[in-house]
Image (tube, coloured by chain):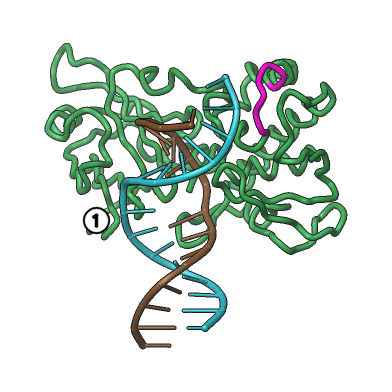
Chain colours: A green, B cyan, C brown
Amino acid sequence: MPELPEVETFVRTLRPVLVGKTILESDLRWKRTLAAPTPKKFVQEIRGQKIEGISRRAKFFNVQLSTLREPQGKPSNLIIHLRMSGDLLAVLGGYQPGTHDRLILKLTDDTSLVFCDPRKFGRVWLVEDPDEIFRDLGPEPLSDAFTADWLYASLRSRKRLLKPLLLDQKFIAGLGNIYADESLHLAKLHPLTTSDQVTKKQAEHLWSAIRETLEEGIRRNGASIDWVYRGGEFQNHFRVYGRTGEACPTCGTKIRRIVVGQRGTHFCPRCQKGK
DNA sequence: CACGTCACCTGCGTGC
DNA sequence: TGCACGCAGGTGACGT
């Protein structure tokens, strides 16, 4: 489900609800959802931990915890990735587990944190050092580290198709299929353009297109599609994603769909030339 | 290093 | 109505 703007929206919604609460009990309902440590260790270690903060890195949640139980308990981090169909919600009052709930954390103040994930692709880690998970990620596209110069140099230094490159989390962290297609359309770049043939000017356009698209996604509280997720309204402002055969908002040409790197890819054949 | 293919999973919409 | 099929917001492990 989520890309950077959706995760960011979740973080902003969950933060005021979760911070300060303590985890009383955990209910791991699908073992493979837990990537590390072992279920036994996880259930033992997470009990009694207090939620100090919640932040985002790329499409990951990082829930920072501190142990109140033992005097020298080490601070740890609950890392969550929703992958395709995951959902994370805080529920007040008695909670009855649903069919697709994979992990439920019972918190103080009669609150539950529910990780629901129909397709079971989502993963949860409990680690001391979040960098263990984040180490190989590329720059945050909304941070100062992501500059037009950096993007230009990085595009030129490899020879990759733009679409799969934008989806590569080691290159830039946080874009997914929707925001990659939308960014390429805004930048007027064909998804099959080879990265080493992008001009400086095009790189600058792509840089601002990525930022604008992500910022608009966040401003609209993310995109809600299909039966998963709710709340956002960016889906009502897609220019190309999921609009195969409809008119390009810029020039009216019919949007085309091709498959690139096994992913559906939407673009305007008139606005996005170059292949 | 870059690319293709498969695997992991369930559920929904479409067309016969 | 039933059923097969294609599609889905992601990523990692392979092989070439």
Q: Is residue A101 above or below residue A51?
A: below
Image vertical order of residue A169 relative to residue B11, above or below: above
Label 1 SS = loop
Quick check: B2 left or right of A54?
Answer: right
Q: In the depicted view, which residue is nearer to us: A158 or A147?
A: A158
Q: Quadrant of residue A128?
A: top left
Which chain letter matches label 1? A
Residue situated in front as seen by the camera: A5 or A274: A274
Residue at (82%, 24%) from the top-left corner?
A: A199
Q: Quadrant of residue A107?
A: top left
- Residue A215: percent from left, percent from top: 66, 37
For label 1, the crowd category at 10 Å Cα-Cα, with few meaning under 14, some 14 to 19 and many 20 or more, is some
Name the residue carrying label 1.
A95
Tell me which residue sits at (80%, 50%) in the image.
Answer: A269
| Tally of numbered discs | 1
In the depicted structure, whether residue A38 falls above or below residue A226:
above
Q: Nearer the viewer, residue A140 or A18?
A: A140
Residue A29, compared with residue C14, is above or below; it is below
Q: Which residues are magenta?
A: A155-161
Q: Give the position of the C terminus of chain A as an image quadrant.
A: top right
Q: Amino acid at mark 1?
A: Tyr
Question: Can you give x and y, in whole percent of width and height, for residue C15 in the image?
Answer: 41, 32
